[in-house]
Amino acid sequence: MARIPGKGFGFWTLTFLVVANMIGAGVFTTSGFTLASLGDPWIVLLAWFVGGLVALCGAFSYGILIQRMPASGGEYVFLSRAVHPFAGFMAGWISLLAGFSGAIAFAAVALESYLPGDFPAKLPAVGVVVLGAALHGGRRWLGVGVQNTAVILKLLLLGIFLGWGATSIDWGSDSTRSFQTEGGFLAFAQALVWISLSYSGFNAAVYVAGEATSPLIVARALVTGTAVVVLLYLLLNAAFVLGAPAAEISGQADVAAVAARWIGGAGFEFFTRVVISIALLTSVLSMMMAGPRVYGKMAEDGVIPKIFVLREDRVWPAVLLQMGLALLLIFVGTLQELLAFLGLTLSLTAAVTVGSLFFGKRVRGWAALPPALFTLATLTAASLLIVHDPGQALGASISLVLGGIAYRLTR
């Protein structure tokens, strides 16, 4: 879809899109599973810090990519042009199955686990996906307006949570004590792959780059949004893993709510559930906005049916495709199964995409350092995870095989 001169997405809309994509289900669910694996709250925080540095390197690298190839479509466009159309198709296929559909399902299911009240199973998750499709399948200004307002509200409420938590946590309590696990270096690598899912939205703005005011604005939004989220994640996770005894939150999907109950009682837990529900809602809305842009670009190139091409007066076919796949995954996967599948699959895709900077016109000097660090760190963590738990590679392998078959059929 061609950009309308003077009416493209600006810096703040793009930055909010990055923040909304990143602050999703991962940060509110991962630390419980990570603590069960690592056994020490401080090592969990170290993992989040390392993951944040890797994400900043990734955001810088994607900023270089979007200035070289200023078009909507993300990894699909980058790999199609820099490596080979097959590589681009596989990236678009993974976006279709995991990058957006799987991530939307993950956020929607997590929202259901945090939402205050008692609802029929799957109903809240289905409802929020349908809402996202309704907002972004129509007029662009409506979806963007709701999106930006919700992100501002989310940041304000998270700020209140952090302020309340900082004054209420007993920093010298038993919550900082570790417990024995089988942990080790391989477990730390597994934690990094899981945590990478929480940081994976750092590239969100590239999916709508063709509708942005300029590629440079996109690059700045990527780095700014990521830096804000890294700081916020470290503060949030300090409250989560230090606010309650480690044994109480270990392995818990609703780790933030459990920690909130220990910090401030039932009232603070209810407030936290409301805040996180709003945060997860904005995550779903932002991905329902970004995902169809990838499928629209694939349709323009003829690798999927032309009906999914985005036009100013017709974006609903691609949005409905996104909605249908997300709803399917909501009904077939659990929260932890989606976490394992998404973390590994999206890590590998991002590593290959950033690695494409070293094809053809290569990056030089200091500019090559962030892409090299991101690619090396991501591939190392993913490889160690596969060694530690080979079963987690199953979902990624099946996706790649199905993608190869689909590519042959489209040829």
Image (cartoon, rainbow, N blue to C red):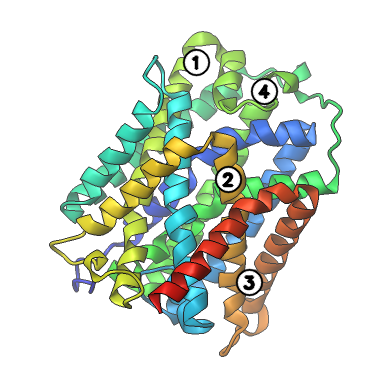
Residue position for label 4: 249
Vertical side of 132 occupied by 247: above or below: above
* Amino acid type of the residue tagged 1 in the rendering: Phe
Identify the residue shown where x is 41% and y is 66%: 206
- Element class at badge 4: helix
Residue position for label 3: 371
108 displayed left or right of 145: right
154 displayed left or right of 366: left
Depth check, mark 1 against mark 2: the one in front is: 1
Q: Earlier in the sequence, mark 4 or mark 1?
A: 4
Q: Are marks 3 and 2 in contact (CB under 8 Å)?
A: no
- Element class at badge 3: helix
Whether residue 287 appears in this view of the structure is yes
Q: Residues within 10 Å of mark 4 (few under 14, many from 20)?
A: many
Identify the residue shown where x is 46% and y is 55%: 97
In three-dimensional space, the C-alpha distance between marks 4 and 2, rounded to whole angstroms, equals: 22 Å
